[in-house]
Every structure is written in structure tokens, then in C-alpha cells.
Image (spheres, helix red, strand yellow):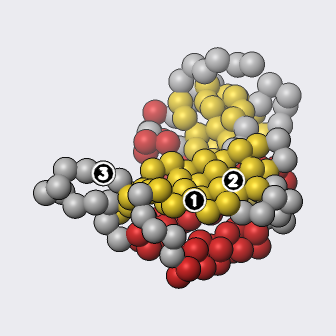
Amino acid sequence: MKVPPQIVFHGLERSDALETAVRDKIAHLEHLSSDIMSCRVVIDLEQKHKHQGHPFGVRIDLTLPGRELVVDRVQHEDVYVALRDAFDAMKRRLQDAVHQRRGDEKQHARELHGEVVRLDAEGGSGFIRTPDGEEYYFSRDNVAGGHFDRVDVGTAVQFVVEPAGEGLQAKRVSLGRHHTP
């Protein structure tokens, strides 16, 4: 980390044990991403109604190159639980940021449009042809909503392509006129 972590206590006395717990959790975040530039943790003893107790609030500001991640006001009556929950939330945000930066985000399958060109109603399968001439096998189980009985030759469909045992196959086949790009 380029800037030493800041740990701020509001409304409560500084505690070596609590500060050590925070530093351990920051170190864990640094294992997830080595390019953390700064981290500021604020632990606040909230002033609530006297019959509701005094929950602790935790805020974490973490800076990465070109990005700031914030977890704000995670509250609990046990300061260590509030701390754990806040750092768990920050860990998820940091992991998402790291995956996004690496390009590891889940890519959703591109939907294709086509028309049913061959159908074996008894066997529960058929073939779809796309406008570029490619054909894809589909089965009864691949038709969304269990509407295989509504499929006929010439039916317009929308689907995604996924690898199958013997090549590519149409999955999540939905019926009807769909907008073609």
C-alpha cells in the first residue's frame, strides 16, 4: 500500500486489540489486490436512543488506481461483528473490481435468431438455421417453457449456442418473432 492505512475512532477510546484486528483485515485485502493505494477505516460509536443500545458503525474507504471503493455504515452492537461485516462487504467489492479489471467478468452468451428447418416431433428434436446458414441441433429439453409442441418447421426462434457432446447445440430456445439485429 502506498499510503499507510488510517484507522480513526469516533466516540470511543482507541483500542490496541481493535486496531490490530483492523490491520489484520487490511492485510487480508492486500493479499487480494497488491495495487491498493490507500485504506481508511472509521469506527464510530453511534449515538442512538438510550433504550436501543449503542451500535458501532464502520466505514471503509479503499483506493485503487482509477477507482475508489466504499463500504459505509455497517452497524452492529458488537464492534467486532460490525468490523467483520464491513470487511466482508469490502472483500466482495474488491474481488469484483479485480475480476472486472482483469476482464474475468462472466460473459453472457450472445443470443442468435433463426428458423426451425427440420423437426422430428416424435423424437423430440430438430434443427435451427440462422440467417448466415449455420444449423444447430436442439431437443425438447432446450425449448423454454416446455413449449416443444408449439414448434413447427418455419417457426422463428431465438436461442444461445453452447458446446454439447457432438459440437454446438441450441439452448434456451424461445419461440416467436424476435427483433433481429
Q: Nearer the viewer, residue 152 or 47?
A: 47
Q: Residues within 10 Å of mark 3 (few under 14, many from 20)?
A: few
The reply to whether callout 3 and callout 2 are in contact (CB within 8 Å) is no
Between discs 1 and 3, the one toward the N terminus? 1
Q: Which residue: 61% across, 30% down?
A: 157
Above or below 133: residue 181: above
Between discs 1 and 2, the one toward the N terminus? 1
| Residue 21, position as x, y percentages in the image | 57, 78
Q: Which residue is mark 3?
A: 47
Tell me where residue 166 sits by quadrant: bottom right
Can residue 138 be seen in this snapshot?
no
109 left or right of 47? Answer: right
Q: Residues within 10 Å of mark 1 (few under 14, many from 20)?
A: some
Q: Which residue is mark 2?
A: 62
Q: Secondary structure at mark 3?
A: loop
In front: mark 3 or mark 2? 3
Q: Which residue is mark 1?
A: 8
Q: Nearer the viewer, residue 142 or 35?
A: 35
In front: mark 1 or mark 2? 1
Q: Nearer the viewer, residue 57 or 126?
A: 57
Q: Secondary structure at mark 2?
A: strand
Kindly report the distance in space between the C-alpha atoms of the residues bearing marks 3 and 2: 26 Å
Kindly report the distance in space between the C-alpha atoms of the residues bearing marks 1 and 3: 17 Å
